[in-house]
């Protein structure tokens, strides 16, 4: 099974710069002029697609092994996260908004 999570954006060049900072690398593939794709794991990918009508409506959750470390690295890259919250008594999460206000939640299971 493969997962492709789509994130619609209004301005692809602006989004490319931001997602390259978020993910610390350029896209793994550019299938066409309006899409960029990053491989997160062997079976999980995210793609950014220029779609002005749907821009800003994505909800994506990415689970990491060390949330504090990930947030420190992102802060060094100029990406600001919201407050860290604990949900379900053991999972810590935070939300990061891209330039289109797409909601990317990072979490760490406890």
Image (tube, grey):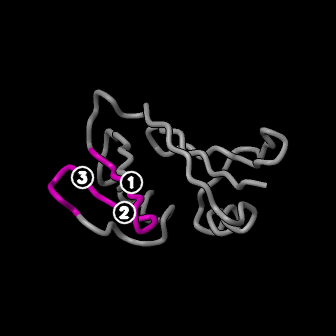
Circle 1 Cα neighbour tier, 10 Å, few/some/many (<14 / 14–19 / ≥20): some
Quadrant of residue 79 within the rendered picture:
bottom right
* Tag 2 near tag 1, CB within 8 Å: yes
> Quadrant location of the N terminus?
bottom left
Which residues are the magenta region? 30-49
Q: Is residue 33 left or right of residue 41?
A: left
Mark 3 sits on what residue?
35
Q: How far apart are the alpha carbons under marks 2 and 1?
A: 5 Å
Residue at the top extreme of this rendering = 53
Assess whether mark 1 and mark 3 are in contact (beta carbons under 8 angstroms).
no
Q: Nearer the viewer, residue 108 or 22?
A: 108
Q: Secondary structure at mark 2?
A: strand
User: Which residue corresponds to the image point at 43% horizontal and 58% vertical from the top-left?
Assistant: 19
Under circle 3, the secondary element is strand
3 or 19, which is in the foreground? 3
Which residue position holds label 2? 38
Q: Which residue is mark 1?
A: 46
Alpha-carbon distance for marks 3 and 1? 10 Å
- Real-space Cα distance between discs 2 and 3? 10 Å
Q: Residue at x 73, y 54 (%)?
A: 109
């Amino acid at each position: 099974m493969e997962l492709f999570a789509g994130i619609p954006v209004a301005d692809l060049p602006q989004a490319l710069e931001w997602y390259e900072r978020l993910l610390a690398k350029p896209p793994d593939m550019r299938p066409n002029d309006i899409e960029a794709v990053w491989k997160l794991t062997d079976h999980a990918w995210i793609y950014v697609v220029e779609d002005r009508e749907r821009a800003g409506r994505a909800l994506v959750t990415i689970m990491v092994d060390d949330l504090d470390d990930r947030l420190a690295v992102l802060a060094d890259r100029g990406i600001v996260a919201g407050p860290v919250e604990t949900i379900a008594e053991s999972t810590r999460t935070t939300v990061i908004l891209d330039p289109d206000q797409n909601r990317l939640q990072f979490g760490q299971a406890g």
